[in-house]
Amino acid sequence: MTASPRLSYAFGAFRLDAVDKVLFHRDRPVPLTPKAAETLLALVERQGRLVTKDELLRIVWPDTFVEENNLAQNISMLRRILGESAGDRQFIETVPKRGYRFVGPVERVDSENDAVAAPAAEPKIQGPPARDVARESTDARNSLRRAAVWALIAAVSVTLVLVARSRTGKPPPAAGTPFSTPAAAGVPSGAEGVTRIAVLPFVNLGSPDDEYFVAGMTEEITSRLAGLNRLAVSSSTTVTQYDRHGKSVRSIGGDLGVEYVVEGSVRWARTSGGTQVRITPRLIRVADDTAVWTHQYDASLSDLFGVQADIAFQITGALPVAIEVRERRRVEARPTDDTDAYLAYLRGITAYRESPSNTSNQTRARADLEDAVARDPRFALAWSWLARVYAAQYESGAQRKPEIRLAAQRAARTAIELDPELPEAHIALAQVFLADRENDRALEELESARVGQPNSPEVLRLIGAAERRKGRWSESLRAYMRAFALDPASIAESIAVHYLQLRQYPEVRRFIAIAKAGNPGAAAVPEAWMLFSENGDVAAARRVLEPALKARSPADARVRGLLARLEWFDGHRQRALDLIKEMDAAGAWLPTNFRFPASVAAGEVYESMGRREEAAEQYAAAMADLQRKQRSAPDDFQIEAALGLAAAGLSRVSEAVRHAQRAVELEPVTRDAATGPLYLYLLAQVQARLGQPAAAFATLDRMFSVPGFYNEVWVQRDPGFAALRSDPTFRAYIDRWSLQKGDALLQRPVKPPRG
């Protein structure tokens, strides 16, 4: 079947797709807000004719009253992007006090293919023959997909920033402020004065046993570049997970939103004469796939820090990027003089970075980092990462023990004592404070970290997480958007999770698409959660989770935990039990990072199958394990919630409600706005199961009055709420709860929960 014609307009080196409203410059998408694109299209379609300001306002904002200043800002943005100066109006002419006229020559291009037509070349005496659009190369098709994603990034980013500002009572930013520039909207072009760069995983040319060493070298080079004020360096986690197979540098740059990439190789040669490391980095400009700088280094292990520093200096010199004296000292820093300690450190950070939520990786990383600091007790960087691993073990449930939390605090403070200016040390202490719900202290540490890493997307992401826990949702979004402007690929998933809690699923879908543009396997859990929450579609969620399950180890609990729960909801009880049996020692999972015994999850499934004796055995085993843990952690809200679920399974009514209510008291919404709603959900579940429908409805009312991961679909499908579904008022509650999303949640203050 022949596709309908697709219309584009070509002018100079630009092409405007009239269907998707995407502007291209020499086949590369150019960032435009939706309204700016509509303004340009209105002018181009009326080329040579005066378009009055009133007419443009009616075309671009047909159902909204806006001030003329909005139109002026769009024109100003278009002129900057089209390269016009005050004395050179080759495209857009201003007719004083009346309107605007597009004066450049325009060529209409009709394509008979779904792909967008090629951009017009610069005017020539004799142009090349017409291109066969039906035979577009794979790389060109990839370019179109990236164009759609980047157009989405620009549109979503600017819209969300304006929304965030409006909620705080602030006017939209004027042109030239950080959020009004295309770069701040998270688009491929560089932010003003800041160059975006990604360090791709170096290739290991030596033994497979050296993979950790090569990955660690990549991480170290990334870290040294990230400390420079004029560089924005993509997250190493995102870049490591990025699938670059079969892609050109230009494609990679488009996916990651960077202007330069660093790639290279490492060979670690061991001979009778000693050890030699050959490192060959290359700096490549994305725009024309040109190697700007390359060099071959041959060094001993003791010389590696000098090589890493020189690579950073050579890269900044080639860009060029000015380096301050303080930054130079940091780049040249030698973190340890103990080679074995450094190798243990590289093994540790490589294991952790590979999958921070994987409890097996956490165990490996912890052992290696403990070895590193044992070999060199003054190794501040290793202490920093060890603190982060301890905090991750505590938060993920792998080692939810008071001594692990205290070990995380000691490790982070040791790092700061050894090197007060080390950004990684302040990041580590911030993560410890976040685990302890000391959000204000975490924000103080993150501001200290920003001094050494001013353009770190990770630091801004953590600021967003801290603000979200405080219930400052608009402030959280602004921090996320600042991080997104620097590194869209790595931050998109965090913003998707932000919108999951606001129950705004169209926005979730948009940001998941951005996250998956560079890594198709990214954001599996948020995507599956969204698909189920929208309309209870377990099959759609399963199609996302099953491939992710095969790609991850059993120690990554999130995928397995969510899939087991949805299979139970869908009546596939044996499949749910099979998944539960393969869970790691920390057990089952619910967001955000609630880990509870797998035996509780198994008991729930057995109970729904009518196998009450087996269910009771599972619940009793869970009770015994939890009571033992409670003796050393009497105020742990996760243990209290899990005790409530187990006691409910054993029909111990007063005991179950007491534990579930105490979990809510220990982790109220006012203490953690991101996590608190989960414990209201669990309390309501206990109340519903034990014949207290009025109390369950009241608790759910409280939960739905604030942002949270659970919506009305979960209450309709979760077997724990089966008793409520026969209540004659259930439908009215569902209808009311379905309205609790987005602005309806943000327009009311968070009140301390009762009881």
Image (cartoon, rainbow, N blue to C red):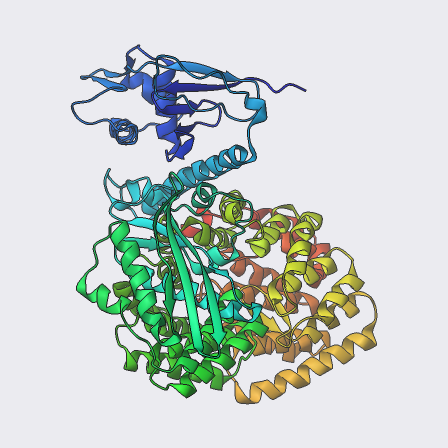
Which residue occupies the extreme top position in the image? 49
Which residue occupies the extreme left position in the image? 87
Horizontal side of 627 relative to 395 (left or right) equals right
Q: Nearer the viewer, residue 513 or 624?
A: 513
Tell me where residue 648 appears, x and y as whole percent: 69, 74
Q: Nearer the viewer, residue 667 or 96?
A: 96
Horizontal side of 637 relative to 337 (left or right) equals right
Which image quadrant is residue 575 in? bottom right
Residue 547 can be seen in this image: yes
Q: Nearer the viewer, residue 123 or 86?
A: 123
Which image quadrant is residue 449 in? bottom left
Residue 751 can be seen in this image: no
Tell me where residue 314 appears, x and y as whole percent: 28, 57
Which residue occupies the extreme front position in the image? 273
Is residue 365 depicted above or below 256 in this figure? below
Is residue 130 depicted above or below 266 in this figure? above
Tell me where residue 456 appears, x and y as whole percent: 34, 59
Q: State the residue at coordinates (68%, 59%).
A: 550
Quarter of the image with the N terminus is top right
Q: How many marks?
A: 0
Is residue 7 depicted above or below 263 in this figure? above
Tell me where residue 637 appears, x and y as whole percent: 53, 76
Q: State the residue at coordinates (42%, 87%).
A: 374
